Amino acid sequence: MELELWQLELKYAALRIGEASRQARAVAALCEHGQQQPVLVVAGGGADRYVLIDGYARVRALGELKRDTVHATVLALTEAEALVLAFRLERNRARSAIEEGWLLRELVRGHQIAQSDLAAWLGRSPSWVSRRLALVEALPAAAEAAVRAGVVAAQAAMKCLVPLARANAAQCERMIVNLGSRRLTVRQMARLYVGWRAGNAEQRERIVDEPLLYLELEEKEAAETPPDPATEREQRLVRDLGMLAGVCRRVRDALGQREKELPWPAVVRYAWQEAQSSFGALVEVVVGGGRA
């Protein structure tokens, strides 16, 4: 059905990150092809009002193009059921872990759904639900706002701001405030976190109070210092170990979602044996070299 934009209640806009590049693509697609997919809505609180569940980028793009109407599908579901359905049907863009955490928090706090029920509704494990909620609960309000506005990348928030906030939430919030509207790359944010973690109390205060100055001085020092092959090897090793840890977490999540009583397929058993062999060889190198 066709709805006018004024009829939509945009109460769940804060569950997604605002990405300028994605919004520009949505505007371009609407100009070239028109609206290809309907947005999802449920009945709202008043007459002729509807709560927008999915399609916020399309609605914002229509507004930018001064369009008055949007093609919508009305779901005969509660808001919570519709949010879960939209999550499970999502195809255009996978949510980041932080966006998943925001959705879970909304369902738990706003709709009083138990975490154990959420796991079943979403087709995920209870540990997945707990980890996503813990992720967003760790972030201070200023950090969440920066991620939501697209100033801080979700990946940078997960890798740097979350551990920083868990160690010192006040300093994490101060750093975000002192960054202002400056958009940093994931690598720049990682350098801030590494510098903060390695510094003493006084150095940490300086990094938190003047993060942009710290990055500027570090970049200048790096430009004046010739590359050290040993350091470069260590950086590659740290990156590879981080990737290995990420793969292990994904495998753990996948295994946790399987029914425990189900037997493993032969191909999975073989892959596990190969992985065990590789891990065993790696452990021998680390332990045998006295590095552990």
Image: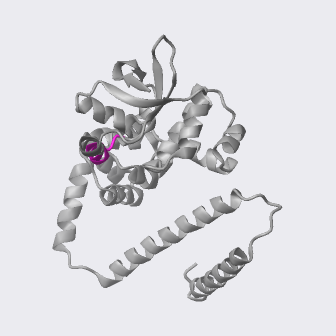
- What sort of colour scheme is used for the picture? one colour
Q: In the depicted view, which residue is nearer to us: 116 or 192? A: 116
Q: Which residues are magenta?
A: 18-25
Q: Report the number of numbered marks.
A: 0
When asked about the image quadrant of residue 148, the answer is top left
Residue at image point 60% right, 26% down: 78
Asked whether residue 26 appears in the rendered view, the answer is yes
Residue at image point 59% right, 38% down: 84
Q: In the depicted view, which residue is nearer to us: 202 or 169? A: 169
Does residue 23 show up magenta in the picture? Answer: yes
Quadrant location, the C terminus: bottom right
Q: Is residue 196 left or right of residue 256?
A: left
Residue at image point 21% right, 52% down: 213
The image shows residue 5 at horizontal and vertical percentages of 35, 23
The image shows residue 73 at horizontal and vertical percentages of 49, 31
Does residue 52 show up magenta in the picture? Answer: no
The image shows residue 115 at horizontal and vertical percentages of 68, 38
Q: Is residue 59 left or right of residue 227?
A: right
Q: Is residue 188 left or right of residue 73?
A: left
Q: In the depicted view, which residue is nearer to us: 9 or 4? A: 4
When asked about the image quadrant of residue 199, the answer is bottom left
**Which residue, as the protein is rendered here, is positioned at the far top?**
47
The image shows residue 146 at horizontal and vertical percentages of 35, 40
When asked about the image quadrant of residue 197, the answer is bottom left
Quadrant location, the N terminus: top left
The kind of secondary structure the magenta stretch mainly shows is: helix
Q: Is residue 58 above or below residue 215?
A: above
Q: Is residue 5 left or right of residue 111?
A: left
Residue at image point 29% right, 49% down: 206
Q: In the depicted view, which residue is nearer to us: 169 or 65? A: 65
Asked whether residue 104 appears in the rendered view, the answer is no
